[in-house]
Image (cartoon, rainbow, N blue to C red):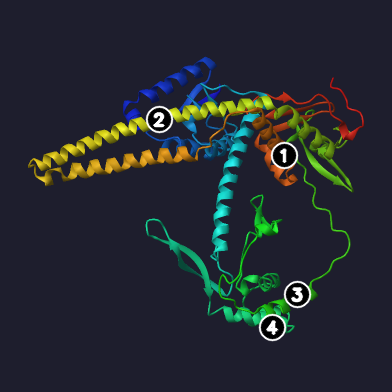
Amino acid sequence: MTRIAIYARVSTEGQAEEEVPINGQIDECRKFAADKGWEVAEVFTDAGFSGRTDDRPSFRHMIEIIKSSTNPKPFDIILCWRSNRLFRSVEHRLAYSRIFRRHSIRFVAMHEPEFEGASAMFMETVLAAADELYVSQVSEDTLRGLKQIAMAGYSTGGKAATGYRNVRKVAGLKPNGEPIMRTGWEIDPDYAPRVKKAFEMCANGSSGPEIIKATGVVTSPSSLVSLLRNRAYLGERIYNVMKQVDGKTRRRANTKPEDIIRKENAHEAIISPELFDNVQAVLERKRPHIQGRAQNSKRTYLLTGLLWCKAHQALYTGNTNASLNYYVCSAKRKLGAKISPCRNVKKETVEKFILDNLKTHAFTSKRIRAGLEYFARENQKNKQEDDRERKDLLIKINKVELELKRFFEAIASGVNPENLTQPIEERSDLKNKLYLQLAEIDRQREIDLLLPDITDSMIEGIRAKYIDMFAASPEKLKAILPEFIDRIELDETTARIKYFAVEEQKVGCNWRPQGDSNPRSPP
């Protein structure tokens, strides 16, 4: 029998005290589960907690149970009254949906439609795109602010270059008169002379090991080269030359020259321009000049871990033979071609077929419109809930202010103030708490993702953005596909994509095994 966990939540203390909304949610969920033949294994409730935060006791407890479980899993489905009982932000929905998928747990909202097939995958992708848009906006705003800091000559974070040390400086005043503090660099009296000596020794022809031993500014020749090429020692502040790639490796970015921040005289120079130029000339002469064609980079097999042999229920794995790239059934590798006569699948052919089908059948204008309309409805419901929360808070604030007014009137009429000190302090603390909750609702509403009116041009623009996703680097694309695809079952005539938590759906009708010139029809 399918085991489920019910999650229910109300936002305000008034609702939590009444407990009617929570009990109503649980009762409806139990009836829904009984109609489906599901067994209720757990019930999690959070009373008086906003869905905008994931810092809710029962919610955190439920996530810990999921993460700490192995086999068997604690339940198969998380059921709630509406999805906004569980999530009120795109970021949280994405993050925790991935956790649910990794543990093979479905999420069902009883008053919302369950999307099927490619539609279900698409809705998750819409969420991913919305999250990426949000992160991109935050990243752009952050980068813009860091550029302004760098242009003013201040540090954008991290340790100072060897030979300098960080120092806090007043960069201006806030509207309220408080100082704006920024981090700058100043000469480090212990290491700056060593850095200058390293440059001088290099200019005079000393070797890397000799410089390292004499100065101790670095520990390896590669680090020494980086130090000797650093224009920070000329007093320059350079920013936005490096970037992270796929969140893992750092490499020199292909940044446009106009986007690189260069600020001269940002801090005191350690060496002269003449000495720096002499050192660069020495490094260039020592730089090895390798001729010949560069080695081919390692092939990225996009469908590794996703492509399955239907006949043997075994994974296809990548295989590179000379200049030929194939997916090979792992059962064939293990048992031999005579026992498992599965044909090898040409890498480029099957990858192109799968991606083309996703573009054509999953990312359609109709599904994009359905996704946007769904988000618009959810935004409206969230706004209504915010309005109810604000109304409840304002009623409580008015009640507390009235109580405080009566206390002060009593004092004015002759009541001893000491007798009212404690209740006045309690009401004042409660009033401040309520105003903070009200301010948080208003702040969150300002940063919520707002959807403009849905138009045909808007939909086509979004569709173009989705299609651009398939032009990402192979490494990034390989990381994207498992977010919504469970497996791709393959036989000689059919490719069938199975999405998370939905029934498998056939995508396309023909494919070309091993890159044959003519497509083969399914049986």
**Gap in Å between the C-alphas at discs 3 and 1?**
41 Å
In the depicted view, which residue is nearer to us: 423 or 45?
423
* 10 Å crowding of disc 4: few (<14), some (14-19), many (20+): some
Q: Type of residue at label 1?
A: Asp
Q: Which of disc 1 and disc 2 is earlier in sequence?
A: 2
> Can you name the residue that lies furthest to the top here?
35
Q: Which of disc 1 and disc 3 is earlier in sequence?
A: 3
Q: Kindly identify which residue carries mark 3.
A: 283
User: Residue at the location (57% across, 62% down)?
Assistant: 150
Badge nearest the viewer, 3 or 1: 1
Left or right relative to 452: residue 21: left
Q: Quadrant of the N terminus?
A: top right
Image position, residue 407 (x, y; %): 16, 39
Q: Type of residue at label 4?
A: Met
**Gap in Å between the C-alphas at discs 4 and 1?**
51 Å
In the depicted view, which residue is nearer to us: 231 or 210?
231
Q: Kindly identify which residue carries mark 4.
A: 201
Image position, residue 12 (x, y; %): 36, 32
> Can you name the residue that lies furthest to the right here?
517
Q: Type of residue at label 2?
A: Asp
Left or right relative to 33: residue 331: right
Q: Kindly identify which residue carries mark 2.
A: 387
Q: Kindly identify which residue carries mark 1.
A: 468
Badge nearest the viewer, 2 or 4: 2
Q: Which of disc 2 and disc 3 is earlier in sequence?
A: 3
Residue 147 falls in image quadrant: bottom right
User: Residue at the location (63% across, 26% down)?
Assistant: 369
In this orientation, does residue 77 appear?
no
Q: Type of residue at label 3?
A: Leu
In the depicted view, which residue is nearer to us: 182 or 332?
182
* 10 Å crowding of disc 2: few (<14), some (14-19), many (20+): few
**Gap in Å between the C-alphas at discs 3 and 4?**
12 Å
